[in-house]
Amino acid sequence: MVAMVTGANGQLGQELCRLLDEKNIDYIAAKREELDITNNEAVDIYVDRKRPDVIYHCAAYTAVDLAEDEGKEQNWLVNVEGTKNIARAAEKVGATLVYISTDYVFDGTNEAEYTENDVPNPKNEYGKAKLAGELAVKKYCTHYYIIRTSWVFGQYGKNFVYTMMNLAKTHSTLTVVNDQIGRPTWTRTLAEFMIYLIEKNPVSNIYQLANQEKCSWYEFAQEILKDKDVEIKPVTSAEYPQKAYRPKHSVMDLSKAEELGFNIISWKEALKQFLAEVSKSS
């Protein structure tokens, strides 16, 4: 089996490629400079030439706040049109498509956990584009897996964990939002699930994957910096305004992934393993 990874130089893409290497699975790393997913003809030619059995579609525009204004067009171009191009090309060569979506497809007003069957209602441009990407995958692909995830952190690229660690070096006090609740996701856990789906080969469906247990950004920051000499103060979303709407309670139900037999560790355990890895490599 040959896999193809779009966005292979991104945060998730690099983690996935590393895991594929560990598992000795052949793959094509389609980096941004090698494949412009917004160019339909280029995508068709590239995928037809490589003829992968599975495409892990990790490429995405993830600047959530910029997507509200100056990045709005690019957000739609990459996350919707780019996904359409990849989906159609995957179908032409009979490849299974694994598409990464987001908890931002929900409005965050549900106090219970969101299931895959709950009606999406995105409130920001990024969420709207990722939902449109989901619909494109369903429309064009016979065999696919859509994975909604949330609060992603990992070794490669920018993320909340690195931001907190860097701020703690220069600040004695940090303020972090305490009224947005969700599930952090380690890229390693997500990459493992992506490969697991292909190995198990269940019917095409939407799945939700994050690490176990929920928290606020404030609680997440506390755990990240618990060994650092820094004070963390909780604030409300109103005290920390951002361009893009953030769901207040976007905790996703993980039971469908668990029913497949996939073991999901807690976000605290994931963070512990990640920080140990970062410490070892620094």
Image (cartoon, rainbow, N blue to C red):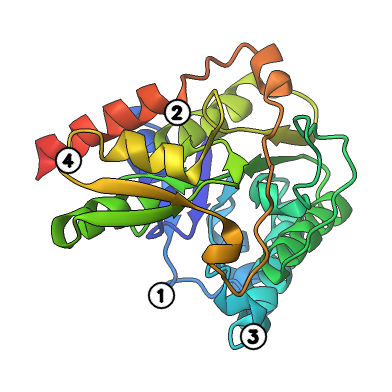
Give the Cα separation between the discs numbered 3 and 2.
Answer: 32 Å
Question: Label 1: which residue?
Answer: 33
- Within 10 Å of disc 2 (Cα), the crowding (few <14, some 14-19, many 20+) is many
Tell whether label 1 touches label 2 (CB within 8 Å): no
Residue at 90% of width from left, 45% of height from top? 119
Q: CA distance from mark 4 to mark 1?
A: 39 Å
Vertical comparison of 168 with 261: above or below: below
Which type of secondary structure does the marked residue at label 4 adopt?
Answer: loop
Q: Mark 3 or mark 1: which comes first in sequence?
A: 1
* Residues at marks 3 and 2 touching, judged by CB atoms closer than 8 Å: no
| Mark linked to residue 267 | 2
**Left-right relation of 117 to 157:** right
Dot 4 or dot 3: first in sequence order is: 3
Amino acid type, callout 2: Trp
Could you classify mark 4 by the number of other residues whose Cα lies within 10 Å: few (under 14), some (14-19), or many (20 or more)? few
Say which mark, if any, is on residue 69: 3
